[in-house]
Amino acid sequence: MSDFKFEAWPTEYRSINQYFGANPQNYSQFGLPGHEGVDIMAPMGSKIFAVAPGRITRVRTNPEGHNYGIHVRIDHIDGYRTIYAHLKQANVRVGQQVQAGDLLGLANDTGNSFGSHLHLTLKKKDESYKNWPYHIFDPTPFLLPLLGFQKPAGPYTDGWAYTSGITIAGELAQANTGGINLRKTPSVYGRKIDLVPGGTIMILTGNKRGQYTAVKVPSAALKNAPTPEPEAPTPPPTDTSATVDGWAFATYLSLTGRNAVVGQYGINLRAKPNRQATNMGLVRGGSTLQVIGKLSGEYLPVRARRQDFSGPINVPESVTPAEPPQTDETDTILGWAFNQNLTINDRQVISGRFGTNLRSKPNRTGQKIALFPESAIGTVAGLAEGEYTPVKVARKRLKNVVGRLPSITQPKPFPEDKEPEPTVPIHDTTPGWAFTAAIDIDGGNADAGLYGINLRDAPRRDAKNIGFVPANQSMLITGPAQGEYTPVRVDDNIIEKPFSPKPTDPEPGDQPNPEPIPVGHALIGLHASADPTITDAEVAEFKAMRPGMIKVLSFHNPDGVQKLVNNHPDVSWVVRAFLDFRSPNGTRNISPNQFFNDTINDVRRTINIIGSGKDVVIELHNEPNLVPEGLSGAWKDGATFAQWWLEVLRIYRQAMPGSRFIYPGLSPGSEVRGLKQDHIQFIEASRAAVEAADGLAIHTYWSNVYPMSRAIDVLDDYISRFRFKPIWITEASNNKSGTSASRKATQYLQFWRDIQQRPTVRGVTYFVASASDPNFKEEVWVGRNIGKRVGRR
């Protein structure tokens, strides 16, 4: 097996624009079965890097006369070669040795190219890949690990994932944006274990069964993971170990007999039992300590192994010795007790009638670890969470204690119990979780990778972002990895405010997103009512389908829009500037200024309800290739519409700077005399408007006689015409009778799965949640359980 691998991402922005093998219709003229490389986002003038060590074998500096334009070729170990095409300039020379991450040149669109990007081709000398000529190989498996496709650490939870909701690569899979429901059995009716956050990597454990695939999900990625079988704790230090005696803050420990397990963020070992005493060092989370004496105030005397420390150890000449332990009361067990069966007086807690079960977690799914008998006394160990209070009870007072204690969820300490962060020998630090694939680990330390990392408060992709750690900055590892994350402590002087990427495509100089977006990043959503009022039944339909994107019309009732905003605070939005072009005498001739004046107030009101800082695009008008939407009135064809629309765009941008505006979706299909102009003819004639827009909206439909594959063909034709234009599918549906509602729901999930392979597509909003017009009755969701079926994914 070859040792060759990609060690660095080749551009400043980790986003793929076109996959290997895509759009075969465009490449057959070159004798290729499809796109023979991967196109990667690289704005004009941005940097291009070597993916692996190697020797430069060719540098073409002439932008003319070659499909690749200006390009660089590198030979690597084991016969592999990479090609970096469409450059603005090359900064290397033939024969030069380069390392992974070395600068090769700057991006452009020289050669046979549409828009600035990097085209990356992979070849292997004297070998062939499937039916590809010229020794071409698929670079995707080499790129995916750099996008976080790495085997996550355990423990794991087994279950079944809806296949259309995951992206599979080899033995791994990734939850698409929006997340997927993990189920106990391979059925939409199977018991839901939990929601797996979008982007989470999981391990394939079996074959597909029906619509589901067997997977193993890192338990750390789940908010309500089932209680795992308890693991044997690490043995405590022995008398012959290289150990350090000191004092540990008791609230941060879980006691089991004469041993104590350190909480997940680690603990400062001090020379005396007080907060101002010398900090001898940080003991990693999860380490097992030996209790060597009696509790003194807030501190417990313990013995720790030197190997369990993170960073330097500073033992002073004098360490306060421990008093002999009082076995009965020091031997306590931490657990979570149901609030309603407790009597609490300050820090004292008394168990109620019939006793109270102690659990490993602050919820009813936590493992039972002991019975806290009626009238027995314990101590409140921290802040309550929901219906449960953390308590510590002497082992001798408990009944039915399990033979091996599981991992116990550590309580949040009382505000007055919080220990100040260490000052010597370690700077003030913040605990958190670092994305393992984005850090370079060296023993008990790690450095943030090329793009930096977001520090999170739990080992999940959807956990709170504590702050941004810049590239190459160091941190201490405080315990073993869980799932895709490693627990760390970071110097407070290093951490910056949380990084929030712009919703727009980056430009040269923009800070790269430290977290790669999921490979399956296209959102699934729904178009709100075709009528002015969004009803409560419609609001419920949205909630059932778990949207990632919502389309509203600017004239929708504010109360309805507000309810959608409240229920779905993190979705992306499409707002259509709505104006009726119909009149009793035909089509209204509406000028750009009149369109603006008649729509701007509604658009602004809707945008204000959605709120600032949200991902929003504004679709200016709708299906302009139809006579009822303005054709034959203010414009006669695509060219005259482009003039009209560019003026509307200019006025809107002046009125709403910073907003994004997309070209409106056309009615797909060929010409219908007196009603519609062919959508391809129309959009090519209005290409100037598309190029000026921030994105392109499209509409596509299918039925039982016009298959969904044809609707995908319409999408692919748009992509081939506008290679790197962001696309929003703002209307799509099976719009005819003859297909059941349940089958339509399945088709919508299949369509969503298919668009994941088209990386310039931002998402789809299916038409329509509700409509009073009988022409739309086959597309309506409300009352047909389509949202519920889609939401089970």
Image (cartoon, grey):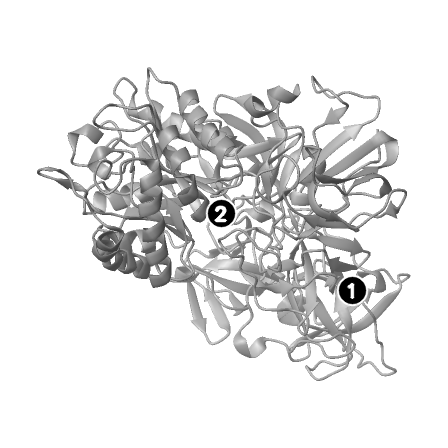
Q: Position of residue 24 (x, y in %)?
A: 58, 23
Q: Position of residue 610 (x, y in %)?
A: 33, 57
The image quarter containing residue 79 is top right
Q: Is residue 172 above or below residue 596?
A: above
| Three-letter residue code for mark 2 | Thr
Residue at x 60%, y 55% (from the top left corner)? 513
Q: Is residue 353 above or below residue 694?
A: below
**Lower position in the chain sequence, tag 2 or tag 1:** 1
| Three-letter residue code for mark 1 | Ser
Q: Is residue 704 left or right of residue 35?
A: left
Residue at x 59%, y 61% (from the top left corner)? 410
In the picture as drawn, the residue positioned furthest to the left comes out as: 584
The residue that mark 2 highlights is 365
The C terminus lies in quadrant: top left
In the picture as drawn, the residue positioned furthest to the top comes out as: 705
The residue that mark 1 highlights is 310
